[in-house]
């Protein structure tokens, strides 16, 4: 039997195939009762966010490299040199803090994609109840239901 040619327009891209694998791996419905179509939507949102965060990290690393290559101002002289050194140090620290924040978000996104594959996406890590669909639409990498998240925030504010 001759091989049927598939047009390029009907082929799936690599990210689309990965998304389809993640949704298939989750089964027909997640343990949280999320239907496959909804899981596919969340997987697509998470994959787009992962791509965006990776791109942002790449840009930060490229910028960080150019900043680190700049010579540090000579601190033996004028007061302006001290201001320049302090400004450079502040900018480097700010860049590192932003990079750390983006890496944390990327970790949460990748964890949510893992939960989709495992069939546990949409289940609160704390109480085990389903996370509201509106919350997942707003924050697709949410790991806590709104009630548990509020409890976590209150506990965090008391510690401060």
Image (cartoon, rainbow, N blue to C red):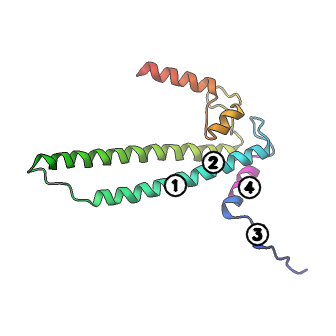
Q: Separation of disc 3 and disc 1 at Cα?
A: 27 Å
Mark 4, secondary structure of its residue: helix
Residue that numbered label 2 is attached to? 46
- Looking at the image, the residue that sits furthest to the right is 1
Spatial CA distance of label 4 from label 2 is 13 Å
Q: Is mark 1 on a helix, strand or loop?
A: helix
The image quarter containing residue 93 is: top left
Tell which of 20 and 11 is nearer to you: 11
Q: Which residue is label 1 attached to?
A: 54
Span highlighted in magenta in the image: 18-27
Q: Residue at left 69%, top 33%?
A: 134
Q: What element carries label 2?
A: helix
Q: Name the residue under label 3.
A: 9
- Judging by the rendered image, the residue that carries numbered circle 4 is 20
Q: Earlier in the sequence, mark 3 or mark 1?
A: 3
**Precedes in sequence: disc 3 or disc 2:** 3
Which label's residue is closer to the chain start, 4 or 2?
Answer: 4
Residues at marks 1 and 2, CA–CA distance in whole angstroms: 12 Å
Q: Is residue 50 above or below residue 151?
A: below
Which one is earlier in the sequence, the residue at label 1 or at label 4?
A: 4
Majority secondary structure of the magenta segment? helix
């Amino acid at each position: 039997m001759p091989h049927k040619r598939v047009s390029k327009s009907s082929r799936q891209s690599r990210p689309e195939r990965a998304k389809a694998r993640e949704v298939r791996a989750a089964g027909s419905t997640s343990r949280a009762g999320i239907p496959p179509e909804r899981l596919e939507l969340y997987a697509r949102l998470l994959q787009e966010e992962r791509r965006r965060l990776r791109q942002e990290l790449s840009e930060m690393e490229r910028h960080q490299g150019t900043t680190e290559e700049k010579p540090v101002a000579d601190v033996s002289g004028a007061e302006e040199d001290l201001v320049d050194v302090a400004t450079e140090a502040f900018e480097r620290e700010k860049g590192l803090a932003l990079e750390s924040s983006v890496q944390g978000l990327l970790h949460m996104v990748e964890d949510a994609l893992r939960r989709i594959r495992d069939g546990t996406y949409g289940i609160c890590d704390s109480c085990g109840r389903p996370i509201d669909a509106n919350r997942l639409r707003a924050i697709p990498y949410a790991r806590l239901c709104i009630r548990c998240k509020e409890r976590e925030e209150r506990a965090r504010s008391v510690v401060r």
